[in-house]
Amino acid sequence: LVCGARAAPGEGASPASARLTANALKLARWAAASGDTRGLPFVIIDKSAAQAYVLEPNGRVRGATPVLLGLAHGDQSVPGIGERPMAQIRPEERTTPAGRFIAEPGRNLQGEDILWVDYDAAVSMHRVRATHPTERRLERLASPTAGDNRISYGCINVPAAFYDHVLVPALKTFGKGRAVVYVLPETKSLGEVFGAYGLPEDDGQASTQGRPPQVSSGR
């Protein structure tokens, strides 16, 4: 199964001043103004910049961090991938899907607490695991570029300190452990992915190349 065997589910700056990427800033402003999160905290994953932003329901940024993402570029999961053994998942199938997800806390079969993003596709957000030194996951997180942050089977790997001290407290304080997770597309426009939820259409997807300074590195 993607990112490991599954078990049953179980003071920031405003978006206007935080160094969010252009697409993340647009999404944050819309989510806060429209009430799309229904009072839940939210997380924005900008795959092009390999960045995650944790925000309060009103749009105040709690922190930001580099993340590791699925090896393959693409915005959809292969149908049925959550039921397949990891050994059977080809490199080109290891995508982090784009979209709007209601994320809930859970545990995998190793007993680790995680945040399920897309349970059916077995995509979660969890602390980075450095169990295979040749993958250099910690080094990839620490590098100044986003290009080497594609290594996972689709899950969103977060620095452990950021997970424990930024993500988890925000979810407990504002969402009773739950959050809305917006994963920004990299092959589609924002409108194609989020237009159905009310995000206004525009002329295309703003550039997100490069990694902006972090609000909080979490490391």
Image: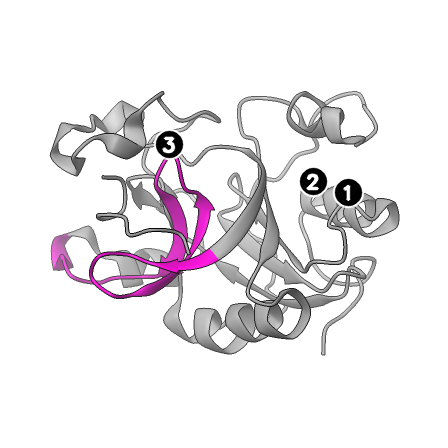
Q: How far is the residue under mark 3 from the one under mark 1? A: 23 Å
Image location of residue 5, percent across then percent down? 22, 48
Element marked by disc 1: helix
Of circles 2 and 3, the one toward us is 3
The residue labelled by disc 1 is: 26
Residue type (three-letter) at the residue carrying disc 2: Asn
Q: Earlier in the sequence, mark 3 or mark 1?
A: 1
Please state if 167 lies on the left or on the right of 106 as rendered.
Answer: right
Q: In this view, does 198 lie above or below 39?
A: above
Q: Where is residue 209 in the image (x, y as percent from the top left)?
A: 57, 40
* Label 3 Cα neighbours within 10 Å, binned few <14 / some 14-19 / many ≥20: many
Residue 116 on the magenta segment:
yes
Q: In the displayed structure, does residue 207 sit left or right of residue 135?
A: right
Question: What residue appears at the point 81 percent right and 52 percent down from the top-left corner?
Answer: 32
- The residue where tag 3 is placed is 95
Residue that lies at the very extreme toward the right in this rendered image: 33
Query: Quick check: can you spot residue 24?
Result: yes
Residue 166 x %, y %: 55, 73
Marks 2 and 1: CB-CB under 8 Å?
yes
**Quadrant of the rendering where the N terminus is positioned:** top left
Q: Would you say the residues marked 2 and 3 are in contact, meaning their CB atoms lie under 8 Å apart?
A: no
Residue name at image x 45 percent, y 69 percent: 163
Depth check, front residue: 55 or 109: 109
How far across and down, in percent of the image, does residue 164 sit? 45, 75
Q: Is residue 185 magenta?
A: no
Mark 3: secondary structure: loop
Residue type at the position of mark 3: Thr
Mark 2 lies on residue: 23
Q: What stretch is highlighted in magenta?
A: 105-134
Closer-to-camera residue (125/68): 125
Label 1 sits on what residue type? Lys
